[in-house]
């Protein structure tokens, strides 16, 4: 019997057939990109640069690829996996998949079209893909005199488009937030009377017709994203101030009222921070006006905490938004006069003292994120002649710096709302 015995499938004489001895390991990869193949192992050396790894565009159940940190440098220069049209742990390839821990080795096995590529083992920990940030924004509704339902889309570079004819019931004092990662929802408001209807926005920025409302009718509330793909609306007035909240599922379904926590108020603002949490802040506690600067943090499960003693100028009719992927900013507002000050919020929800403002003094404005890590404030009321409504915007950098006024586009208005949407730039 000739040949290597262990390569003899049946340990018998005759033709010798080689048995697959495992994966075929390739030369060390040092490039910034590499396309890999099933049935192979790769040592990825990121000493000098990060590396994007493109998986095969087609695969069969049981296909296997191993990736290993050659020089224990993934903690400095991470690898990013592009699943190339296939799913990765049930998520599409618009989701960001980074491995950034030194010494990791990932054994990827294709499980089929339902879940796609799955880490069968990971010497550090199991991995969940990270949802990418929204790239575009939308301003909608508000009051021109009368109320309106027009919208203005914002590009991934912060350029505001001209008016889009409104869909749904015209109203002011609405709230807006992103949900499902790349979509948005406007809800509640005042048409002349308080309502609880909502309008969903798809990931192309198209606003849908009215959905019959759930929860207490109210206006001048606020909303924010939490948990990465859900939203909540909170506070506002029904004629008297309230602190109730309504959670929104990852498919845009608004839940019934959750009993309020914290001081009832209207004219407050809300934003996401820390990637999956939210914060409500400032507002008017009522009777007739009592501006405040207190805040309420929201966990990644949508649970609202008790009042946190306020920092900064007491005010209401301001706006807030996330920026820099994990921080937030409150800006503008009113308290016996209009402001342009802002307050930055850290990625653990700590509100900073006042920062001297930039741009036109105003209140009743709106804000949203764009471009993945930046934001903008837009529209509002300056209190000038003809009520002073404006359409100017102020861009916010990914370090929280507010820029000077950008000439407005679209119908001047106030008491509107804004939200981010779309994973695509």
Image (cartoon, rainbow, N blue to C red):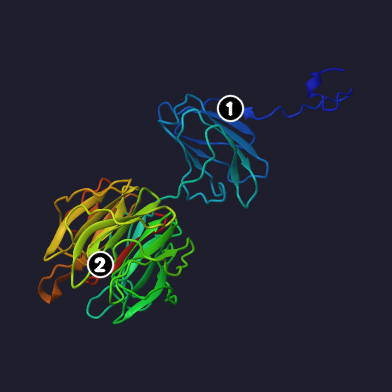
- Cα separation between marks 2 and 1: 61 Å
Around disc 1, counting alpha carbons within 10 Å, would you say few (fewer than 14), some (14 to 19), or many (20 or more)? few
Along the line of sight, the residue nearer the viewer: 63 or 366: 366
Q: Is residue 23 above or below residue 60?
A: above
Around disc 2, counting alpha carbons within 10 Å, would you say few (fewer than 14), some (14 to 19), or many (20 or more)? many
Q: Residue furthest right?
A: 13
Describe the element under mark 1 as helix, strand or loop: loop
> The C terminus lies in which quarter of the figure?
bottom left
Indicate the quadrant where residue 121 lies: top right
Residue 389 is left or right of residue 350, and the answer is left
Describe the element under mark 2 as helix, strand or loop: loop
> The N terminus lies in which quarter of the figure?
top right
Q: Where is residue 190? Give x, y as percent.
A: 30, 77
Q: Where is residue 270? Give x, y as percent.
A: 31, 59
Along the line of sight, the residue nearer the viewer: 290 or 114: 290
Indicate the quadrant where residue 318 lies: bottom left
Q: Is residue 185 above or below residue 341?
A: below
Residue located beneath label 1 in the image? 26
Q: Earlier in the sequence, mark 2 or mark 1?
A: 1
- Disc ID at residue 267: 2
Along the line of sight, the residue nearer the viewer: 67 or 213: 213
At horizontal 52% and vertical 51% (from top left) the residue drawn is 92
Q: Where is residue 64? Give x, y as percent.
A: 63, 37
At horizontal 33% and vertical 58% (from top left) the residue drawn is 155
- Disc ID at residue 69: none
Q: Where is residue 80? Give x, y as percent.
A: 47, 39
Residue 105 is left or right of residue 269, and the answer is right
At horizontal 27% and vertical 67% (from top left) the residue drawn is 265
For the question of whether residue 367 can be seen, the reply is: no
Q: Are marks 2 and 1 in contact (CB under 8 Å)?
A: no
Residue 36 is left or right of residue 421, and the answer is right
Indicate the quadrant where residue 192 lies: bottom left
């Amino acid at each position: 019997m000739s040949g290597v015995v262990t390569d003899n499938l049946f340990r018998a004489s005759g033709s010798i057939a080689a048995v697959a001895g495992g994966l075929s390991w390739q030369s060390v990869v040092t490039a910034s990109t590499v396309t890999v193949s099933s049935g192979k192992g790769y040592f990825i050396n990121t000493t000098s640069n990060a590396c994007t790894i493109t998986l095969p565009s087609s695969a069969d159940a049981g296909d296997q690829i191993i990736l290993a940190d050659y020089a224990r440098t993934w903690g400095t220069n991470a690898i990013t996996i592009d699943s190339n049209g296939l799913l990765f742990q049930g998520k599409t390839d618009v989701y960001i998949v980074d491995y950034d821990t030194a010494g990791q080795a990932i054994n990827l096995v294709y499980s089929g079209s339902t879940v796609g590529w799955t880490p069968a083992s990971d010497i550090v920990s199991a991995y969940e893909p990270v949802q990418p940030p929204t790239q575009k924004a939308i301003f909608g509704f508000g009051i021109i005199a009368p109320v309106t339902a027009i919208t203005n889309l914002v590009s991934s570079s912060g350029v505001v488009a001209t008016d889009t004819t409104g869909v749904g019931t015209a109203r002011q004092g609405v709230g807006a937030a992103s949900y499902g990662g790349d979509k948005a929802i406007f809800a509640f408001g005042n048409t002349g009377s308080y309502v609880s209807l909502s309008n969903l926005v798809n990931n192309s920025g198209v606003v849908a017709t009215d959905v019959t409302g759930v929860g207490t009718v109210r206006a001048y509330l606020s909303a924010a994203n939490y948990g990465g793909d859900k939203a909540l609306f909170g506070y506002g007035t029904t004629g008297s101030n309230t602190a109730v909240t309504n959670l929104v599922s990852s498919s845009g379904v608004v839940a019934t009222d959750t009993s309020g926590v914290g001081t009832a108020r209207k004219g407050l603002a809300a934003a996401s921070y820390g990637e999956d949490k939210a914060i409500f802040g400032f507002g008017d506690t009522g009777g007739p006006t009592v501006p405040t600067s207190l805040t309420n943090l929201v966990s990644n499960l949508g649970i609202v905490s008790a009042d946190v003693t306020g920092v900064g100028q007491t005010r209401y009719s301001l706006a807030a938004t996330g920026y820099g992927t994990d921080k937030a900013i409150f800006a503008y507002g009113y308290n016996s006069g209009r402001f342009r000050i802002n307050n930055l919020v850290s990625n653990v929800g700590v509100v900073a003292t006042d920062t001297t403002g930039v741009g036109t003094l105003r209140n009743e404005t709106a804000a949203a994120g764009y471009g993945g890590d930046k934001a903008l404030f837009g529209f509002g009321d300056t209190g000038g002649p003809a009520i002073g409504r404006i359409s100017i915007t102020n861009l916010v950098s990914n370090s929280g710096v507010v820029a000077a006024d950008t000439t407005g586009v679209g119908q001047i208005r106030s008491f509107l709302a804004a939200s981010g949407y779309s994973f695509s730039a």
